[in-house]
């Protein structure tokens, strides 16, 4: 794709007020003018991940007055615990400039964890009403975490997070992040136990997210490593794994997307480092990708979980020891 074409598609996609840049932020990226969102955008021109240790003193602090925003937030309309209002109150208490809600889009394969079609409409009404009410105090944004298999949203959102939570194979949905056991049994049944064949299918879908969902943010790029903290599920440096992830990046680097550094699995005790893992995070950084910090919040006391320990906007990731 030529530069002018790329800029054209960026301009079409970028919401009102968004500002494109060709500078150190990377050829494919843009930063929104809104300072609250811009402040959440993590830039890394080179280097790797700084280790985020949740046991470190202060690692779990939500950081009153921290000026950190979060745009990946679930409510009781899907599988979150708190109401939009409770979350907005917490965001104000913490001094967040902005708060983006991103309920799970309706998925027929897993209706328990997502918003129902009626619930989606109620969610939208409530968040829009709160946006009015909190104007001047907190910049509330209406978003949606758009699952790969969901129908395109009917409503209008400020932004979409595109996510792969399941891989459909032979007519069956293999849920990626439900449990280690379910994942392993599914890989056994549908892939004859070949975890890398599953990873190849997973990353094929991730690579397709922009084209399919026109999402602004790529959610938890390597969610399939949720249960791989001890490395026993798969080798995240295996050539087949890296090739599959690299091919997804080949496609996404042509798109105006931000990549999450997502602390959700840390908050829930599955991982000690955020998504993406260090190898892929380094690769995204090497290619000039732009990151955004996300807590993938499901309860208000974890609204900014671990985010204060991630590099600040403009800070280059330190090399991994
Ligand atoms: Zn998700
Ligand atoms: Zn989420």
Image: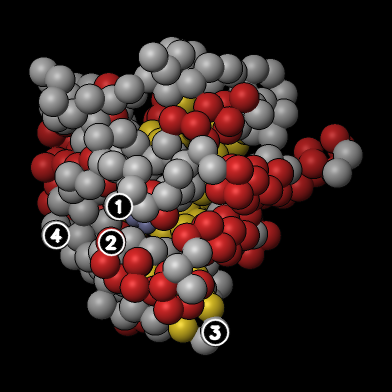
Reply above or below: 73 against 204.
above
The CA distance from mark 1 to mark 3 is: 24 Å
Residue denoted by label 4: 81
Dot 1: element: loop
Residue at 25% x, 35% y: name it. Answer: 272
Q: Residues within 10 Å of mark 4 (few under 14, many from 20)?
A: some
- Quarter of the image with the C terminus in it: top left
Of labels 4 and 1, earlier in sequence is 4
Marks 1/2 in contact by CB < 8 Å: the verdict is: yes
Residue denoted by label 3: 170
197 sits left or right of 295 in the view:
right
8 sits left or right of 235 in the view:
right
**Disc 2, ligand 1: is the CB inside 8 Å?**
no
Of labels 4 and 3, earlier in sequence is 4
Front label number (4 vs 3): 3
The CA distance from mark 4 to mark 1 is: 23 Å
Reply above or below: 226 against 286.
below
């Amino acid at each position: 794709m030529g530069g002018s074409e790329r800029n054209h598609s960026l301009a079409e996609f970028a919401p009102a007020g968004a500002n494109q840049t060709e500078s150190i932020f990377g050829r494919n990226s843009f930063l929104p003018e809104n300072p609250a969102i811009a402040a959440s955008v993590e830039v890394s021109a080179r280097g790797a991940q700084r280790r985020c240790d949740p046991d470190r003193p202060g690692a779990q602090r939500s950081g009153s007055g921290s000026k950190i925003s979060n745009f990946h937030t679930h409510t009781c309309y899907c599988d979150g615990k708190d109401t939009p209002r409770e979350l907005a109150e917490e965001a104000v208490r913490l001094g967040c400039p902005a708060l983006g809600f991103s309920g799970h889009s309706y998925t027929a394969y897993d209706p328990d964890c997502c918003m129902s079609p009626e619930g989606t409409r109620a969610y939208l009404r409530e968040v829009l009403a709160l946006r009015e009410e909190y104007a001047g105090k907190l910049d509330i944004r209406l978003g949606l975490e758009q699952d790969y298999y969901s129908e395109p949203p009917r409503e209008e959102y400020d932004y979409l997070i595109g996510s792969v939570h399941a891989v459909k194979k032979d007519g069956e949905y293999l849920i990626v992040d439900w449990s280690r056991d379910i994942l392993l049994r599914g890989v056994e049944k549908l892939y004859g136990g070949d975890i890398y064949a599953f990873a190849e299918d997973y990353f094929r879908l991730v690579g397709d997210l922009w084209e399919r969902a026109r999402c602004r943010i790529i959610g938890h790029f390597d969610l399939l490593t949720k249960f791989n903290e001890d490395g026993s599920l798969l080798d995240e440096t295996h050539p087949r794994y890296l090739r599959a992830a690299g091919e997804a990046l080949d496609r996404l680097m042509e798109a105006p997307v931000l990549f999450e550094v997502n602390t959700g699995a840390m908050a829930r005790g599955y991982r000690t480092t955020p998504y993406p893992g260090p190898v892929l995070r380094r690769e995204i950084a090497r290619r000039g990708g732009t990151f955004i910090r996300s807590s993938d919040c499901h309860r208000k006391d974890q609204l900014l979980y671990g985010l204060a320990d991630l590099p600040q906007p403009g800070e280059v990731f330190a090399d991994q020891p």
